[in-house]
Amino acid sequence: RQKDNSGNRLVKGRDYTIYIPLGRKSIGTYTYKIVFKGAYKGTIKKNFTIVPAKTKITSIKNKRAGIRITWKKSSSANATGYLVYRSINGGGYKLVKTIKSNRITYYSDSKANRLWSNYSYKVVVYKKVGRKTYKAVGSSSKRIYYLVISYIMMSTCLVLQQINELCILRAVD
């Protein structure tokens, strides 16, 4: 129940009118307007924003050419696309890719190729409405250490080869 500063109860229709914007289920910014009348004067405007629903990273994998991130398709109707952010070794997140389609739900980060580096990713759903871009809350971050199995196997083989050569040399001596 609304009251004025003196404790008098305000009555909708007599003391004020509320103008409610249409289309409040779509992504965008909306303004409620309250116009006071009778013994009360003035107008109050209150804005609220509807943003896209956030997504969830479903997998993150080491690949020979970098790291592949996959996420769940946005449940927001007509989302424009996704923003992929990356953090290296606990640093700040930086935008690494803008995906301009809501149908594409993966990204291969070919620049994530420093061995034993810690890479974290977040994916943000976005929607363009006119000239304005609305962003969802970022997905929970997922972390992975970059390592390439073939490199590790190659290194292991070189070490084993050196050990084998050392053993052969000792056997001959």
Image: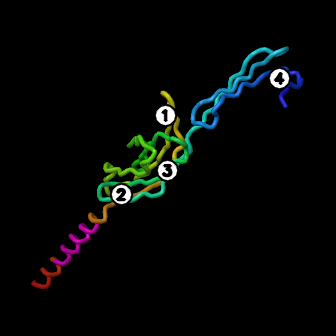
The quadrant of the picture occupied by the C terminus is: bottom left
Which numbered disc, 4 or 1, marks the residue that appears first in the sequence?
4
- What residue lies at 69% left-to-right and 27% top-to-bottom? 32
Q: Is residue 159 magenta?
A: yes
Q: Position of residue 124 (x, y in %)?
A: 49, 44
Instruction: Read off the residue under disc 4.
Output: 13
| Type of amino acid under label 4 | Gly
Residue 94: quadrant of the picture: top left
Q: Earlier in the sequence, mark 3 or mark 4?
A: 4
Dot 4 surroundings within 10 Å: few (below 14), some, or many (20 or more)? few
| Observer-nearest of 154 and 27 | 27
Mark 3 to mark 2 CA distance (whole Å): 25 Å
The amino acid marked with disc number 2 is Tyr
Q: Closer to the observer: label 1 or label 2?
A: 1
Mark 2 or mark 4, which has the lower sequence index? 4
| Mark before the other along the chain sequence, 1 or 2 | 1
State the separation of the CA atoms marked 1 and 2.
34 Å
| Residue 92 in sight in this render | no
Residue identified by numbered label 3: 73
Q: Return the residue nearer the eye: 21 or 58.
A: 21
Q: Which residue is mark 2?
A: 146
Along the horizontal axis of the image, is 165 left or right of 150? left
Q: In this picture, is 122 found above or below 32?
A: below
The residue to which callout 1 is attached is 128
Name the amino acid type tagged 3.
Lys
Examine the rendered structure and indicate whether residue 117 appears above or below residue 151.
Answer: above
Q: Secondary structure at mark 2?
A: loop
CA gap, disc 1 and disc 3: 17 Å
CA neighbours of label 1 inside 10 A, class few (<14), some (14 to 19), many (20+): some
The kind of residue tagged 1 is Lys
**Magenta-highlighted residues:** 152-164
Question: Does the CB distance between marks 3 and 2 fall below 8 Å?
Answer: no
